Image (spheres, rainbow, N blue to C red):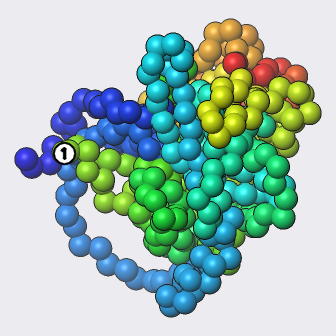
């Protein structure tokens, strides 16, 4: 069957599988799925051919020249990468339906604090972690989770002296930088899978619909890579040549026939975004809202309801303003974040913001993209009052907004 042209993409469809959780990621006319073991969605996208002439090469800040370079990265990081397995009972234990999930995690502390995706552990009744090179499963519980950002922390029980990953910075990444991905691809037995590629694009925005909450959420500032990422890679590290974590693998594109993989289009949450969330996630332990740790026999804990989320909330859906979009929508600014949706009961809605407003600054700092707006809001706390400058048509307005808390 030939590919559909871009303007005739068929509807997205979801295939049920015996897995615990599925997220559908949509960006423009392309579909991607969370990279935990889950259901697949797919489309075909037609791509025209053209000749590209490279006039100048730019220096690569992350160079993996020889196979030994990759092996050195693996040797430093692989011992701190874990496999995560979960069990849930959608209709309750009495209903008899058992769903199992699999994903990946990164050890942050020697006592067993593990970073992963929220969609890996959301709704789980039991969580187990398998350390690198071992077969025994260790019980774990949720310390904190931020579903809108798809980030979670879990704690392995009774551990000390564990190897840890090194968190780098995603701020200096360039398209073309070499990267390595490690993870529990397809839940294959015998240890993690290692793949290599480059940073294919930066600052991607994806919209997600949660299988559990049915709420549509948006992730911004994502790293796109062609390092092969598969189901089960969710929560695993994306690494630079210095063996530093610069992203957390989260989603992968799919094509339309037989749910076969697309041509290596994967997405990772930038580590700078994650580092800003860690204090709030760790706050879940201080609040006494931890989930109980299950035993190997499968006794049910209190699930993954622990949450340390303290993210500020503006209550708008935004997209990047581009010159083409500004021309089409007759916008005055040619950069910024255009509001495409407002929660009427949220902070922005109560302050009078409307769809079509173009946000150009917040508290005096220029806003040139939707990702920058999200990043700036993430540095605030609920209750903070911010001054937002926006354009409504050709009128320049200043709106004062008191940020709220992310809705549960």
Using the image as rendered, state which of residue 328 and residue 294 is in the foreground.
294
Residue 407 position, x and y percent, is: 70, 18
Using the image as rendered, state which of residue 364 and residue 312 is in the foreground.
312
Point 40% across, 82% down: residue:
55
Image vertical order of residue 279 relative to residue 182, above or below: above
**Residue 20: in sight, yes or no?**
yes
Image vertical order of residue 79 relative to residue 44, above or below: below
Label 1 crowding class (10 Å Cα cut-off): few <14, some 14-19, many 20+? some
Would residue 146 appear left or right of 312 to someone viewing this image?
left
Instruction: Name, please, the residue furthest toward the left.
Output: 1
Using the image as rendered, state which of residue 212 and residue 82 is in the foreground.
82
Point 79% across, 20% down: residue:
404
Point 63% across, 55% down: residue:
136
Would residue 227 appear left or right of 262 to someone viewing this image?
right
The kind of secondary structure element at disc 1 is: loop
Residue 187 position, x and y percent, is: 45, 53
Q: Quadrant of residue 398?
A: top right
Q: Name the residue under label 1.
A: 257
Instruction: Name, please, the residue furthest toward the right.
Output: 286
Residue 38 position, x and y percent, is: 41, 39
Q: Quadrant of residue 341?
A: top right
Residue 200 position, x and y percent, is: 46, 64
Give the number of callouts.
1
Point 59% across, 76% down: residue:
74
- Quarter of the image for the C terminus: give it: top right
Instruction: Name, please, the residue furthest toward the front.
Output: 297
**Residue 352: in sight, yes or no?**
no
Would residue 7 appear left or right of 62 to someone viewing this image?
left
Image vertical order of residue 109 relative to residue 118, above or below: below
Using the image as rendered, state which of residue 41 and residue 385 is in the foreground.
41
């Amino acid at each position: 069957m030939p590919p559909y042209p871009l303007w005739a993409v068929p509807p997205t469809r979801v295939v049920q599988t015996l897995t615990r959780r599925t997220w559908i990621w949509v960006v423009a006319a392309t579909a991607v799925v969370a990279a935990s073991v889950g259901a697949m969605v797919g489309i075909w996208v037609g791509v025209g051919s053209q000749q590209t002439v490279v006039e100048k090469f730019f220096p690569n800040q992350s160079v993996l020249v020889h196979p030994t370079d990759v092996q050195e990265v693996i040797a430093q990081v692989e011992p701190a990468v874990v496999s995560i397995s979960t069990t849930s009972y959608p209709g309750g234990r009495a209903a008899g339906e058992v769903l199992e999930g699999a994903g990946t995690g990164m050890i942050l502390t020697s006592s067993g604090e593990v970073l992963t995706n929220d969609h890996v552990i959301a709704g789980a009744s039991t969580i187990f972690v398998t350390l690198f090179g071992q077969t025994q499963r260790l019980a774990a519980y949720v310390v904190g989770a931020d579903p809108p950002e798809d980030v979670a922390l879990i704690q392995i029980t009774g551990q000390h002296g564990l190897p840890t990953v090194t968190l780098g910075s995603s701020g200096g990444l360039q398209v073309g930088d070499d990267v390595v991905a490690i993870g529990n691809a397809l839940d294959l037995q015998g240890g993690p899978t290692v793949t290599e590629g480059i940073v294919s694009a930066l600052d991607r925005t994806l919209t997600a619909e949660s299988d559990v909450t049915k709420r549509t959420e948006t992730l911004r500032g994502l790293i796109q890579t062609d390092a092969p990422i598969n189901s089960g890679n969710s929560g695993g590290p994306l690494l630079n040549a210095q063996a530093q974590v610069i992203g957390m693998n989260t989603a992968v594109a799919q094509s339309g026939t037989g749910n076969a993989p697309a041509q290596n289009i994967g997405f990772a949450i930038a580590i700078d975004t994650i580092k800003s969330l860690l204090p709030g996630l760790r706050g879940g332990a201080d609040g006494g809202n931890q989930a109980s740790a299950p035993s190997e026999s499968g006794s049910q804990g209190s699930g993954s309801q622990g949450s340390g989320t303290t993210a500020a909330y503006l209550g708008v859906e935004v997209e990047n303003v581009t010159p083409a979009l500004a021309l089409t929508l007759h916008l005055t600014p040619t950069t910024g974040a255009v509001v495409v949706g407002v929660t009427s009961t949220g902070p922005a809605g109560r302050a009078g913001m409307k769809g079509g407003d173009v946000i150009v600054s917040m508290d005096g700092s220029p806003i040139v993209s939707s990702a920058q707006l999200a990043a700036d809001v993430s540095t605030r706390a609920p209750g903070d009052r911010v001054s937002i400058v926006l354009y409504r048509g050709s009128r320049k307005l200043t709106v004062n907004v008191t940020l709220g808390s992310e809705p549960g």
